Image: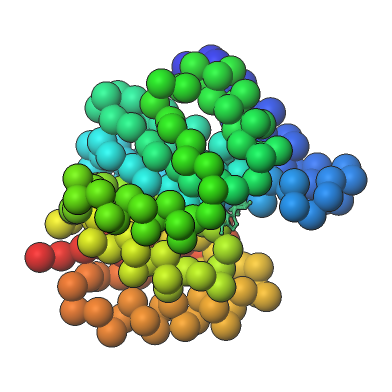
Amino acid sequence: MKESILKVLDELEAQSALEKGRKVDVPPEDRMLAITKDTGEMLNMILRLKSGKNMLEIGTSTGYSAIWCAEAIAENSGQITTIEHNPNKIKRARENFEKAGLSDVIAIKEGMAADILTELNSQGKYLEFFDFVFIDADKENVIKYFDLIFPMVAAKGVIITDNMLYPEKYRPEMKAFSEYLRKNPRLRTITLPVGNGEEVTIKIK
Ligand SMILES: C[S@@+](CC[C@H](N)C(=O)[O-])C[C@H]1O[C@@H](n2cnc3c(N)ncnc32)[C@H](O)[C@@H]1O
């Protein structure tokens, strides 16, 4: 891995550990709430196995998960579109992408996820376009986001959703999401006990 990327990932992991241990005072809306390192490694490996090119992320925060993914996707000359509404986090994510040398690989769409997904859907060019999606924003809207995203996912595309198991406060939303997925005959899905619990879903024909 390039030194510039490793350095930014290390810095973000250190900041995340401080925030999780409540060793720094950060307002709740500005906390990173980043994926775990092993989740980052898993996303990176799946993208490599798939030779992923066109990725969509819901919930950029300060860019930790996007950087893990961009490290793999850059090798396929691919692109990540990532959605975030918090201006402080967007600014920090842009700085992190710049420092990692990944600004060309990652485009941030600023605004509310439901609005942006509706807009992307209305532009016919994204129909079955994304081969990899990572859902990691507000949990109460996870089913809504999935429904907006599904037409834009290519056959054999992978959708990964964070926080299926932790924090426990999200269990009701994530249980409803899990049950919703399992009723859909157009996909295969499994909950993996990696990080905070990752749902790995594949769109089948
Ligand atoms: C769990 S964090 C994402 C962490 C990031 N994926 C990472 O691992 O580095 C969720 C992010 O989603 C953003 N978010 C929450 N609701 C949103 C919405 N309705 N539209 C856009 N972004 C939203 C939050 O501001 C927050 O930064």
Q: Is residue 192 above or below residue 48?
A: below
Q: Residue furthest left?
A: 205
Whether residue 34 can be seen here: no
Q: Give the residue at x 88% y 43%.
A: 24
* Side of 182 relative to 179 (left or right): left
Q: Would you identify the image quadrant in which residue 199 lies?
A: bottom left
| Residue 153 occupies quadrant | bottom left
Q: Give the colour scheme shown.
A: rainbow
Which residue corresponds to the image point at 39% horizontal and 26% vertical from the top-left? Answer: 105
With respect to residue 126, does 159 lie above or below? below
Name the residue rendered at 49%, 81% in the picture: 175
Residue toward you, 132 or 5: 132
Task: Give the total of numbered labels.
Answer: 0
From the image, which quarter does the N terminus lie in?
top left
Q: Residue 61, relative to residue 11: is it above or below?
A: below
Residue 4, how many percent across, how many down?
55, 16
Query: Residue 77 at what x, y percent from top left?
Result: 27, 24
Quadrant occupied by the C terminus: bottom left
Relative to 89, 161 lies left or right: left
The residue that appears at 47% across and 83% down in the rendered structure is 176
Residue 189 in sight in this render: yes
Q: Position of residue 200 (x, y in %)?
A: 36, 62
